[in-house]
Amino acid sequence: MNSKLKWIGIAVVAILVILLVVPFLIPINKFKPTIESKASDALGRKVQLGNLSLSLITGSVGIDDVSVSDDPKFNAAPFLTAKTVKVGVELIPLIFSQQLNVTEITVVNPQVTMLKDPGGRWNFSSIGGAPSKAAPKAAPAGNSAESLSIGKLRLEDGQITLGNTNSRKRTVYTKVNLTASDVAMKNNFPVLFSMELPGGGSMKIDGKIGPVDAEDAALTPQNVKLTISGLNLSSTGFLDPSLGLGGVADMDANLVSEKGEMATKGQLKLSKAVLVAGGSAAGVPAVINFDTKYDLVKGTGILHPSTLSIGNAKSNLSGTYKSEGDAFTMDVKITGEGLPATDLESFLPALGINLPDKSRLSAGTMNTNLHVSGPTDKLVTDGTIGLFNGKLAGFDLGKKLSGIGTLAGIKSGSDLIIEKFTTNLHMATTGLRADNLDAVVPALGSMVGNGTVDAKNNLDFKLVATVNNTVATAAAGSMAGGMGGTVGKMLGGGAAACKNGGIKVPLQIHGTTSSPQFVPDIGGAAASLLKSEFSCAGSGGAGGLTSAAGALAGGSKGTAGDTINQLGGLFGKKKP
């Protein structure tokens, strides 16, 4: 028994001696010129290697300080560098015939620089094609790129730097990992790729690519599943972080690329979106189900009919996009009808719109017809929006109008019914502008005007409110009896004569969207609107009201001046 153990021990020691000593007996560095030549020929780039070492235990050749040159039209620095490359080899041919047969390659900590020129061509497009000027002469046909085959290729813990030749801006992606099997120029081989994204998040590609396009590697066919998780848009340049814009994107898509066209279908979810300066993170995600085709040569794409959903509010998308330098420019239309306003409410903060404190949209539908254009970090939206049969629960218009509410005879209430609200909208990343605003509020009447919401969420609106007939008549009678003098006669006679038009009141709205402040606009911008709006067709009282309108707009002295002062008192404004 002891004799058997003795021989087993001797055998183990002998094997260890062979594994440790034999590598020093094999002049592995003699293969360096051959490896450099074959690799340079296969890639069409000059490949330089450092010291080579052999490990019989792992069955691999270790290569230090690997460098692959870039296309000289793009960059004088290397396209790829790596501290260590492990090359799996067949040991028997290597030991007894000193023949190097590669079974797998593992590149550890590779650093790759990927650049695109203004014409849309990438610096890796020529990989696998004809050697560049910096590469050695072409090897015989038997050693060409087409004959190269690798059982398994791995990239571990790498880094990719992405940019354009006409810009100094660079984006760095880390923890890059790739595994590919049966790699050959003429094969359609499986690939699993992953990397971390700037600012957090990750990307994963799983599928098949190849055969490698001999003229432009960037056009190599692929059929893969693309998964992006937790992409912070403020760190990618898609949204301008200097304006406080941002959001987190998640995407699942199928990508098929062939003959220079890339078709992508899938779903993109945008959470915590902030789309204008002064906005705050949306409480609900926007979900885009998209279908797009992209021309890899021209750098242009078409967004086929797709959908944008916020809760149950679903709009239609279509348009085009284009790659321009570091960014994409868009030209997209968004249309929707009968969208439930209650579902859209939680997304409004992303647009810099916060509902008044302690209020909420409890009913109503919205229509949108919008045109979104420009680079992704400076998008501009123009078009129309409308709210119909809405209810703003928890908003007391009577209290907000204060003295104006007294004039109009508006009763306090916990809810505000909005029969109609339409406007032409212009939205940039720095704020909103509303033109041709037209609203019908049964508790008051109607309002027309325009205004802005700036980057600090401040309101600046100029409106003319037309008090409805019922309220105007009641208010006029009350005011006529209680005020007397010029104002009482003007309101009393005017209201009686304006049963078809109502009383017109110029207003300003200041404060913020969450705390709007209604104030009179005596002689201001809204009063100029009043000149055109203040009329009573077919009435003997028209002259009195028209004169009053002129006094309000022009601020004349005497009786008209007294009228302005007394109206200002009603609105809660101090008399001069």
Image (cartoon, rainbow, N blue to C red):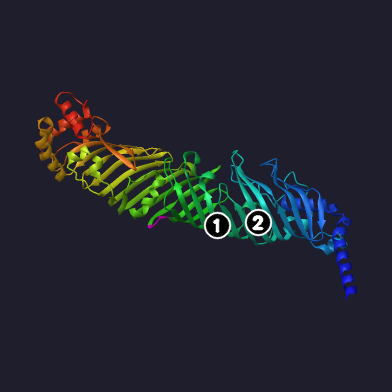
Of the pair 426 and 59, the residue shown nearer to us: 59
Task: Name the side, left or right, on which 439 lies relative to 217.
Answer: left
Residues in magenta, as a range: 308-312
- Which residue has dot 2 on it? 178
In the rendered view of the protein, which quadrant contains the N terminus?
bottom right
Task: Name the side, left or right, on which 106 lies relative to 254.
Answer: right
Mark linked to residue 227: 1
* For residue 508, above or below residue 372: above
The local secondary structure at tag 1 comes to: strand
Answer few, some or many: residues within 10 Å of disc 2's Cα (few below 14, many 20 plus, some between 14 and 19).
many
The local secondary structure at tag 2 comes to: strand
Give residue 126's position: percent from left, percent from top: 67, 49
Q: Residue furthest top?
A: 557
Q: Quadrant of residue 21?
A: bottom right
Answer few, some or many: residues within 10 Å of disc 1's Cα (few below 14, many 20 plus, some between 14 and 19).
some
The chief SS type of the magenta part is: strand
Does the magenta portion include 486?
Answer: no
Mark linked to residue 392: none
Q: CA distance from mark 2 to mark 1?
A: 15 Å
Give residue 572's position: percent from left, percent from top: 22, 34
Of the pair 147 and 100, the residue shown nearer to us: 100
Amino acid type for the residue under numbered disc 1: Thr
